[in-house]
Amino acid sequence: MPDRSTRHATILEVAREAGASKTSVSRYFGGERERLSPALRQRIGEAARRLGYRPNQIARGLKGGRSRLLGMLVADIRNPYSIAVMHGVEQACREHGYSLLVANTDNDPVQERTHLSLLASYRVEGLVINAAGHPTHELQAMAEQGLPLVLLDRWLEAFGADGVGLDNALAIDMAVDHLHERGYRHLLFLSQPVGLASPRQQRWQRFEQRLSEEPILHGERHDPALDGSAVDAIISAFLARAGRPAAVLCANGNVTLAATRALQALGIRLGEVGLLGIDELDWCSLVPPGITTLAQPTETIGRAAVQQLLVRLDGSEPAAPPRHALFPPTLIERGSTRLPGPDHDKETP
Amino acid sequence: MPDRSTRHATILEVAREAGASKTSVSRYFGGERERLSPALRQRIGEAARRLGYRPNQIARGLKGGRSRLLGMLVADIRNPYSIAVMHGVEQACREHGYSLLVANTDNDPVQERTHLSLLASYRVEGLVINAAGHPTHELQAMAEQGLPLVLLDRWLEAFGADGVGLDNALAIDMAVDHLHERGYRHLLFLSQPVGLASPRQQRWQRFEQRLSEEPILHGERHDPALDGSAVDAIISAFLARAGRPAAVLCANGNVTLAATRALQALGIRLGEVGLLGIDELDWCSLVPPGITTLAQPTETIGRAAVQQLLVRLDGSEPAAPPRHALFPPTLIERGSTRLPGPDHDKETP
DNA sequence: TTGTAGGCGTTATCAG
DNA sequence: CTGATAACGCCTACAA
């Protein structure tokens, strides 16, 4: 009886039990059963069952270099967006016979580097990366070694890797158009600190561009820290300055949360001041009269990430130029972008 | 130049480059640098850096049987509870030098079995299991092979494994006591279909017990499917039958969501009919006047799970009896359990 | 302090 | 169709 370490049957034991050779057993589990005589096939099958044998992926990976592992680096595992995408990634992995090694970094650039090399040490065959910082150097090195990478949501400038994410320009267009149609004329764009994060930058820039193109709209943008009461101040100052009808456009779920809180604190009913958020979260339908959102096709994005990796892995396109797959959001209209009408119509449930 | 497969430097190449032996290089990276002469140490370090060498965990795990991998089986990766716990698990793993292999099963018992054996094939050293179904057979086999297991949240009867989770009886006690104190006398316990899921069973049972002990309380329980409008019907029927002051006690986050929607649809203000949910979600503070919840110490639970695995792994307690670690929830009081007072006091923000 | 020689479980190559 | 045998990259006695 084994002491403490898990005792697994090996291919050799199965071979002995079945009166066959390692090779045949290997073939049996390597998807070449047809090449074995029915008799042998059955003996091996039974022996394996009797011994509870499972091929050791680790050993397998050692020989062939195929770990059958994909890695995913997540900046913040508690972010619903990341999770939703991860779900898509995980599904796609499963469908293609891969397992997923997840590394969460809690937005810490140091852990980002650490985990990156950790994933590398497990010889993952590809990497989905959602980094907070800019581990450009590490990534560059990995890419040069031939490891397929795909950047999720945010991509680093001047770094030629594949990427997947939301079509940010389109999203801003849809948001601005919707608010415009609904009669809002003064728009406040609220973002988390823009810094270098590319999606924030892109949304921000597109918003500016739209403002300049349509002078009928008046707008401001701010990127406060969300932890204090800065948002309250910004919103009330904006309203005082800009006049109505005004709306707040939130660059992501966190901001939407903060803005909703702020509007509640200011005693302002949603809709009276418009509110539109990028990212759909389950509470958005709950806060009366419902918050209008642009939902990201998170599952699709996750699957697309894996697809990109598989294309590279496939090897048919040895070194195709980097490809960015952008996906459109879906507008979910709710009461928060419905101006109280002249007849004070109640919203329909 | 390598064709397509990622090319990694091996220990042998480093050894040659440094003019040393494999052994010395192995020692260098195996945490025995002190045993090398400063000269050798430096040569190896430089050679390794030059070649971009990283020890291959896969090969490492093959020899010693230490994959440095922990596995986590998650029934529903999109459930915030699972995520929160996973965050704790992941942190604890990291702190102890393990990586986490995550397998999501989308509540599918078939995938549960599949993924279980998949995790086994990667020779994970321990397993955190949050299963929807009852893969008792597979788990039994793994446990007997000496693989440390810890059941998360729900445990299977008559299966002697470690477990971690919420102290469900205490949670129900806290909920009932709170509602009682706040003046609610008629309680409706709402759960998802109880079936065999142990936490639902436990909460359910404890609720019954409390009712029988305190005849001053009147209560009912239901476990409707949450997809239709069944919840609306149940709640309005209950209110008609039971009278006021009445409150709804929700067994988990999903139920709280459904109940909140139902109360909104019925045009009932929260508080007027009490609402208390087990599980804290970020929207609970947003729906006016805030939903009172019992927050689970999810992070703690996740870390505790890993702790249990490490104890088993440690080997100091070869086959100690199964241990269940239960943790108390935290009551977060909000407006949904505040009866409108005689003076119609506004809640304080 | 350093090096040599297995062996971990599997697959791939080459004979039979 | 089947089976030896040599890698794969690393670790661990054992020897020098």
Image (cartoon, coloured by chain):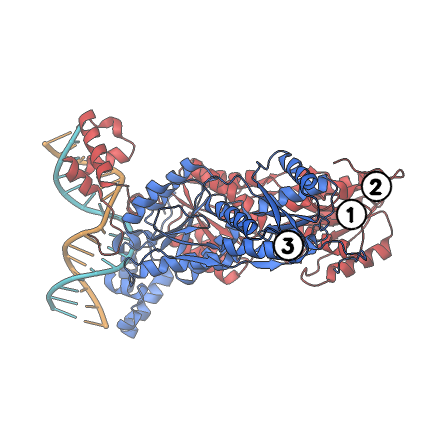
Chain colours: A blue, B red, C cyan, D orange
- Mark 3 or mark 1, which is nearer to you? 3
> Which label number is shown at residue B44?
none
Q: Nearer the viewer, residue C5 or A133?
A: A133
Amino acid type shown at disc 1: Leu
- Mark 2 or mark 3, which is nearer to you? 3
On screen, A142 above or below B258?
A: above
Q: Chain of mark 2?
A: B
**SS at mark 2?**
loop
The residue tagged 2 is B183
Residue B103 visible, this orientation: yes
Q: CA distance from mark 2 to mark 3?
A: 45 Å
Q: Chain of mark 3?
A: A
Expressed as whole percent of the image width and height from the top left, the position of residue A235 reads: 66, 40
Q: Are marks 3 and 1 in contact (CB under 8 Å)?
A: no
The residue tagged 1 is B270
Expressed as whole percent of the image width and height from the top left, the position of residue A90 reads: 46, 56
Q: Are marks 1 and 2 in contact (CB under 8 Å)?
A: no
Mark found first going from the N terminus, 1 or 2: 2
* Same chain, labels 2 and 3: no
On screen, B184 above or below A31?
A: above
The residue tagged 3 is A179
